[in-house]
Amino acid sequence: MFGAIDWSVLAVYWCLSIFIGLYAARSNRSFKDYMLGGGSMPWIPVGISLIATSVSATTLLGVPADVFDVDMTLIMTNAGSFLSVLVVGWIFIPRIRKSGAQSAYEILEKSFSRSVRRVAAVFYAMHLVLRTGILLFAPSLVLAPILQIPIWTAILISSVAAILYTWYGGFKAVVWTDVMQFLVFFGGGIFALFVLVNGIGGFGELVALADESGKSNWFSGALDPSNARTLLSAGIVYAVLEIAIRGCDQQFVQRYLSCKDVKAANRSSVLSMVLGLVVSLLFYWLGAALFVYYKVKNASSLPENIGVNDVFPYFIVNGLPRGLTGLLVAAIFAAAMSSISSAIHALGNTTEKDILCKTAGQESMLRTKMWIVLWGVCGTFAAFVAASQVGSLLKNALFFTGLFTGPLLALFLLSFFAPYLRSFSVLIGVVCGMLSLFLFNDIPFIKYSPPLGKVFSWPWNPLISCTVSVWLALCVDFVVPRKVVNKVA
């Protein structure tokens, strides 16, 4: 059970998050300070913040569950992360920094028009608020029974704290709380693995038994695009999704712009990739250790009919000593709060700079604070809506991710390599790119059977929508005479 010591650990963590936000606010004297940390943030905390933003509570809980259920083959996504860091560091970061932009989508106006910039910002806002709802709701499914509180209360605990320190402390608060939150969930994972390894009989015993059980399988060279657990899908094709996120997501671009130069921004990106690999190894082995602990060594028993997603939470409550249970619950909160704070801060900047297209100033900072609160409320509401839906949260989240990230990547690629295109052609291309996914995917909350539903697995969605967007934009611009559609001013 969750005891007094555990509540104390959780309370200390929550208070530290608020304190960091208050402390960071002291140096916010301008809009640039509030949104970009003054443009001179150290690259090490920025790199840690990048990985803390990427690793959500669903990762902390979902990765061990996936290994417990299948194996480690999805660890091959780290190969995609490596490829994406090379591409983003070579193509995206230098161009974004050189453009003088203060937001991710400002560069699209420089290449095409303000309307393209606004459309991209709206796409991003829709994607991120939906994602925020999922990232708040999913861990609350675990936290509610552990803490014996309603799901809506668990959602509010995470969202209210994150909104408070983000609103008050700005970008510096987000980065430095990300650093603390990363240490909390990484440290919590290490302690949990240590307890499991001791119960199994040592790490060598864990490795041997995990190998015998097939849980340490991490590679598949099959070429079947319908299988997500292959090097082709999870490694190479997945890199497109990573490029879209690392190169076009305001949360990432904001951090690149907060560093003093291109070299520092690239260092932060590489550091986040390395830390991402370390985190993956930790939580993949945690999943293997849970399987060996419960199913092979029978060191303890599980309740009958327990789902794979509930095994790790069950161990947190029943397998850890008091205090460590509180630390692991704090780790889940840490991942959830890191996700929402980065999201609403990025959305505040995107709304002010890219949708409203306001110039920086003191009034702009006040309006951005207002937008941060409003987006936090929207994300919380999205979590409540997710709680009322029936269906696979992961499947729905993956659909919306592919729906928006592929076309956003296409917009950036076209702005870099084909800035001569008309806005009309670009917008037609990205809309058709989004619609192309309906050929391959179910539509959430609608009864619909896609004609090519079993051809491609989920990592292919961004590649499909990006490719269709780029080619149709080029074709439309070539076919439609310029005297018919003038370039939008």
Image (cartoon, grey):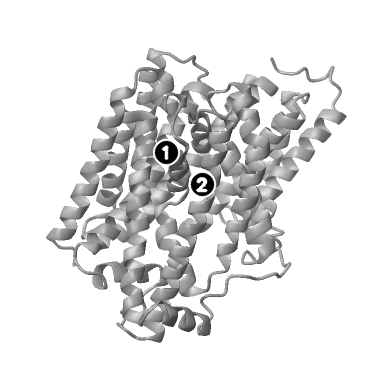
For the residue pair 326 and 226, the one nearer the viewer reads as: 326
Side (left or right) of 210 relative to 142: right
Q: Quadrant of residue 36?
A: top left
Residue 242, position as x, y percentages in the image: 60, 48
Quarter of the image with the C terminus is: top right
For the residue pair 253 and 427, the one nearer the viewer reads as: 253
Q: Quadrant of residue 166?
A: top left
Give the crowd class for mark 1: few <14, some 14-19, many >=20 residues within 10 Å.
Answer: many
Give the crowd class for mark 2: few <14, some 14-19, many >=20 residues within 10 Å.
Answer: many
The residue under label 1 is 342
Q: What residue is shown at x 38% (from left), y 50% (from top)?
A: 182
Report whether residue 267 is seen.
Answer: yes
Residue 361, position as x, y percentages in the image: 42, 13
The residue under label 2 is 271
Q: Tell us which disc is closer to us: 2 or 1.
A: 2
Residue 131, position as x, y percentages in the image: 47, 46
Residue type pointed to by label 1 = Ser
121 is higher (above) or lower (below) than 294: above
Report whether residue 112 is seen.
Answer: no
